[in-house]
Image (cartoon, rainbow, N blue to C red):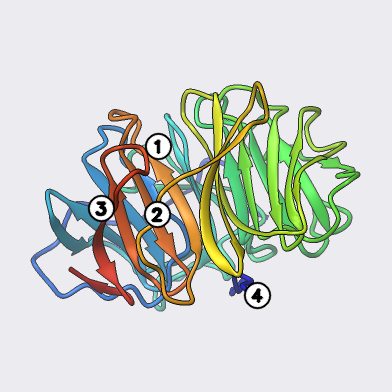
Amino acid sequence: MYMRTMLCRTISTGVLIGLAHLTAGAATTVTLKHIHGLAFSQDGQQLSIPSHDGLALYRDGHWSKAVGPEHDYMGFAAGRQAIYSSGHPASGSGLVNPLGLIKSSDGGSTWQQLGLQGESDFHLLASGFDSGALYVYNTRPNSKMTSAGLYYSLNDGTTWQHALAQGMDSEPNALAVHPSDSKTVAVATSNGLFLSNDAGEHFQPILQNVQVLSICFSIDGKSLWFGSYDKLPQLSTLDLKTHEINALGLPSLNQDAVAYLAQSPKIPQEWALATIKRDVYLSQDEGKTWTAIAQAGQAL
């Protein structure tokens, strides 16, 4: 059985965390010690991978490290207008640990503190690609969330609503929000895939008795991609209108499974996946074939 290990979130709105511009640094050997997310840039030309020691970047066939403090970015969600994250500050940054909820509107050059600094480190954080709706799974109470559970915000974390999450049978492994419908949210658990159309109040089981580890809505909002493990790793799509599930191709994975998925905003047929064992692959044909760009955390 595979369970993604969830390692490793009151900030004043408007404060900027000083970071150097996240442009590709000098050529260097990139090692992905951990993988905490996956996201394409808005132009579709760059893949960003948050990790224990900052952002790794893949662009034009080359890897580099983002210039700037090597924060331990945990929850990581990219929208059309902004990136959201959480985690722990880099040593020597002077920032309170944990980071709480932070937002970048310039591709990661600077980060705005949205709240919960020193209180919460959100491992599961998702945003609607166009709506900007934020969902988190909170493991313990904080000053804005009175109990553990699923919460959402429609105003960049100023206020949070607690979702009852009825029908979700266990703590989620992954969380995803529909790109434009802020009320449609999916969770992946060790027992299946669940979908809600009422902002997380009630969840309908889509697939049960299968361990689901990763989920990602397509940017056009028509399908949900998900990685699962049932004796063998699997990658599938769910048609959100018909609820039909179709299997996709996967590279050869040895006792491994899909941990993260991302779609290019500019080239819809281009997808990326990262595995639990830190392999990273790109597909140019909507998951029919895959090309490795990192294996066991080592850049290729």
Q: Are marks 4 and 1 in contact (CB under 8 Å)?
A: no
Q: Which amino acid does label 1 sit on?
A: Ser
- Quadrant of the rendering where the C terminus is positioned: bottom left
Is 14 placed left or right of 69 in the picture?
A: right
Find residue 39 and name its label. none
- Quadrant of the rendering where the N terminus is positioned: bottom right
Find residue 1 and name its label. 4
Distance from the alpha carbon under mark 4 to that under mark 1: 38 Å
Q: Nearer the viewer, mark 2 or mark 3?
A: 2
Residue 161, image quadrant: top right
Q: Is mark 2 on a helix, strand or loop?
A: strand
Residue 12 in view (yes/no): no
Q: Nearer the viewer, residue 199 or 216?
A: 216
Image coordinates for residue 97, horizontal then vertical, percent: 57, 71
Q: What residue type is labelled 2?
A: Leu
Q: Nearer the viewer, mark 1 or mark 2?
A: 2
Find residue 105 and name its label. 1
Image coordinates for residue 67, horizontal then vertical, percent: 23, 61
Image coordinates for residue 83, horizontal then vertical, percent: 45, 43
Residue 33, image quadrant: bottom left
Distance from the alpha carbon under mark 4 to that under mark 2: 20 Å
Q: Which residue is drawn at 36% across and 37% down?
A: 286
Distance from the alpha carbon under mark 1 to that under mark 2: 24 Å
Most distant residue in the left direction: 27
Q: Which amino acid does label 3 sit on?
A: Leu
User: Which residue was labeled with disc 3?
Assistant: 22
Q: Are marks 4 and 3 in contact (CB under 8 Å)?
A: no
Local packing at callout 1 (Cα closer than 10 Å; few below 14, some 14-19, many 20+) is some
Local packing at callout 2 (Cα closer than 10 Å; few below 14, some 14-19, many 20+) is many
Distance from the alpha carbon under mark 2 to that under mark 3: 22 Å
